Image: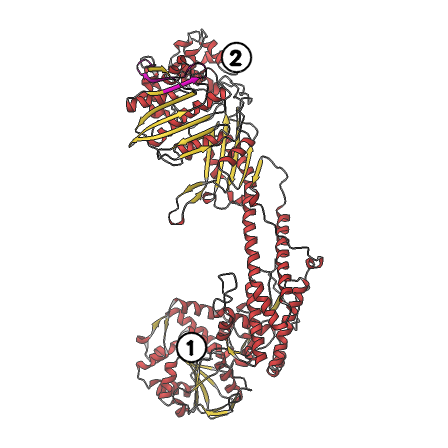
Amino acid sequence: MAEKKEVEPTIIDAEHLAKEFKEHSVAEFFKKNKQMLGLYGKVRTLTTVIHEYVTNSLDACEEANILPDITVKISEIATEYYEIEVKDNGPGLTKETVGKALGQLLAGTKFHRMIQSRGQQGIGSSGCTMLAQTTTGKPCKVITGTGKGKPISLELSIDPKHNLPKIANMKEIDRDFRGLAVQAKFKGVLYRDSEQGPLEYLRRTAIANPHAQIKFTDPTGQKFVFKRSAVKVPKPPIAVKPHPKGVTVDEIVTLSKYSDARKVSSFLRSDFDRMGQKSLEEITKKVSFDMNKDPKQLRWDEAEEIVKAFKEINFIAPSSDALRPIGEERITKSLQNIVDPEFMHVLTRKPQVYSGGFPFQVEVSIAYGGKAGRTISGGSDGPQKRLEIMRFANRSPLLFDAGNCAITKAVHSIEWKRYDIKDIDNAPVTVLVNFISVYIPYTGAGKQAIADEEDVIEEIRLALMQSGRKAGRYISGKRKEAERLMKRELFYKYIPEIVTALNAITKTDKDILDKKLRKMVLLKLKLDDEKEAKENGENKKDEGIEVAKKENAHSKDEPEKTEKETKKEKPEPKKEDHKKKTKAKSNKK
Amino acid sequence: MTEKKAKTTKVSREKETPKQIATKIDNMAKGIVTEIKKGIDPEFTTQQRGRSNVEFDEKKGLLRLGEKRTTRNFLNVGHAKKFMQTMLVSAKAYDYLKHNKTASIREIYYELKHTVPNTKENTFEDQTESDSCIVDLEHSVNTIREKLNLHANPKGTLYGDVVLKDKVHHNDKFNCGKLGRGGWSIMSRLEPEEIEIVSCNAKYILVIETAAMYERLVEERFPQKNKCVLIGTGGQAARGTRRLIHRLHKEKNLPVLVFTDGDPYGWYIYSVIKQGSMALAAHSPFMACPEAKYIGMTLDDIETYKLQNVTERMKDGDIKRAKEMMEYPWFQNKEWQAQLKKALKEKVRIEQQALANKSLEFVATEYLPTKIKNKDFLP
């Protein structure tokens, strides 16, 4: 939802902001600092806009316990000028709330509680309204239907001076519609069918939200449908108060504006988790201002002091009850539905803590074959597959800053060769990692990369290794199967030649020799397999879900019943007339 | 193999009839069929070849094949094709013996080469593959290829006052000094039952590496003037040529002198004639001439005859060869170590034809006679 973020390295900005905070509205601030909110880069901006609308739709549907049906359409009006339409089947917005929800920054329902939410990154849909307005001068068109009364259509813009919505042309329309449809135009953005473009964003959103159905029409008119694979709306996350260790200055400022408390001390106590009397006393000692002042009067620099104090004081760790993983089964179905891999292993690990107290949980999946992997056009060799890393934070796809992300680092830190996955960078493999936490340690305000906390990387690594072992076994099994077939063919093809030659000398029946030799080949390959299986042993623990497509299972063409004696060891090589030190060099395996 | 044994082998080998050899092949094939019927991975045993199984018999001055045996199985990814190829060669050789036909090793290669059904693979990709199977079969049934009715492509020529009789071709008798300038084309099969050395009026055999030098010496009437037999090898001496040199040496008690280019390749030609080759180490007793002497070219000739301006740079291959040869036990004498060291130090080589720098006749009138007169040879 709409919120602005402090960028840690740019303290100057924050100080500047502190002074200006009163004079300028947040809208003004947004206008000047949109790059801080993820709105830089032509491709990235367009993807962020789609993200804001889709996230809002998903959240709204989930809260209303509706299975989301979301339709997204992007049309190119002119170069770097696009129209975006996003429509959902959610609860819709009332006449009274629509302006606030889409036309006022920092106004939303989510600020009053702290939940594991998707909508933590970026600018919110009001930000999109603002962006549309500043780049094209045009208002957004909105249709909203709540199911009660007739749907209404309206045009919405923001008065940036006062951060207030401006609504025009509001009228009832004469058709059945429940949900929200927004149509907005943007300039200076660019559609790309790339790993960071809207299509990939929607694909990954669909994977992480199997209960949602997402339809998409790209600027060339091509249509994509990501079908729903789960028919239950997930349990909504439990609202928890923000933990002091996880809040930022602007969150404190924003929360303070909405607080009913009369004193800063009581505001802190009521709005934050694990805030006891003792902690409050310590904070009071550390800050320079009067904790009895009205929280609505709290200044930016004072909020900074609070954050500083929070960091210095020990708090009880937050509870892990609020974590909501997607779940192994849902990920499995979802990947089957969208990636359709030959093999996959899905694993949801138990909650862990990082930085000495923040609960988090990791879900991973390794999918192989099918549509897994990133397709690149490989020139003369045709399209080729590369490793694809799908990063999610609380189910929300992370498309940017991959290089700085703990997930990427964890994936690359693993020696995949050890799991028999050779050259993973060029394998048709999708690695999915969902990082779940109430407090995601993002690296920056763009919220596109998870900081490489040691505990976090280690946990992701453990999960990946666990899954990697399973995937590796499948992949190497497949390779061995191919080798087995190759070997069999190698022996088989020479049999007719050998049989003809032996027949020419000894007149032995060709069919008998042929059958015997073929049987011998199959028996040898079978014995090789058994020997190998014995050497490898089997894993005791089986965690997670493993799915391999049936048609790819080993095709068994066992030899017909073989006489027992054929398994018996062969006689010693004949020594002929060489008596001493006959080193029969046998290369048999 | 003991000395005694080698002799008995020689005798028994030479007495074996084609029918007996065919029976040997038949027995080998029957053994394999029995293994297959029992469900045992079929295999055949042969002598291991290559440097690791070659020994130098210092006393006799011969290379000998060691006793390391090796087996080839069908059910082994690395052996399967070789196994199949050897079966094909065995069946074909059996067929030749049964029908009293002989073929060159190139002919058997072409006769057996075809595409393996339902593949894009040939039974044999090149002749080296079938050649190697022939050697395997020779060892496996303990005979020589000539007894398998196979022979190499003939190479080499003989010129001089030697009377031969071709016992399998109308008993033709001919004098090799009266066949024109080309002399007699040495056949690849030179077993006594086919070619008989009737008489020989010569004092020694001069073996020459290059065809051009052979022709020069014929033109200069060197054999007539010096009462010698000329044998041109045309590079590395072929099997038949080596057998003929061996037989002339043994049967007519003629000394052997070898004349090659002054480079590691030429010197190795000499060593093969003298001690035998690694590839055919098993046959050295029938082919080598341990008493042979080396007449030239040596690197010392460059100074002696002032040939500095007609030398050539040694190539990388020559250098590599020289280094290998320095390690061979049969090059462990001070004269050859000195030659090889000198070659590696100065990195030059000298061809036989370089003697033409003096004059065309120089080789026939000065170089060879002087060396022979002074017994200026390398061992």
The label nearer to you, 1 versus 2, is 1
Say what secondary structure mark 2 lies in.
helix
Q: Position of residue A7 (x, y in %)?
A: 38, 24
Judged from this view, the residue extending furthest toward the front is: A174
Can see residue B354?
A: yes
Which colour scheme appears in the figure?
secondary structure
Q: Position of residue A565 (x, y in %)?
A: 71, 59
Can see residue A38?
A: no
Say whether residue B262 is left or right of residue A237: left
Q: Residue at x 61, y 55 (%)?
A: A525
Vertical placement of residue A395 versus A254, above or below: below
Q: Residue at x 52, y 16 (%)?
A: A274
Q: Which residue is mark 1?
A: B235
The CA span between labels 1 and 2 is 102 Å
Q: Residue type at mark 2: give it.
A: Lys
Vertical placement of residue B7 versus A255, above or below: below
In front: A509, or A431?
Answer: A509
Say whether residue B144 is left or right of residue B224: right
In front: A359, or A291?
Answer: A359
- A157 falls in the magenta region: yes
Q: Position of residue A125 (x, y in %)?
A: 38, 21
Q: Which residue is mark 2?
A: A278
Segment colored magenta: A142-168
- In the rendered structure, find residue B108 and report the number of the disc placed on it: none
Say what secondary structure mark 1 lies in.
loop
Vertical placement of residue B374 versus A96, above or below: below
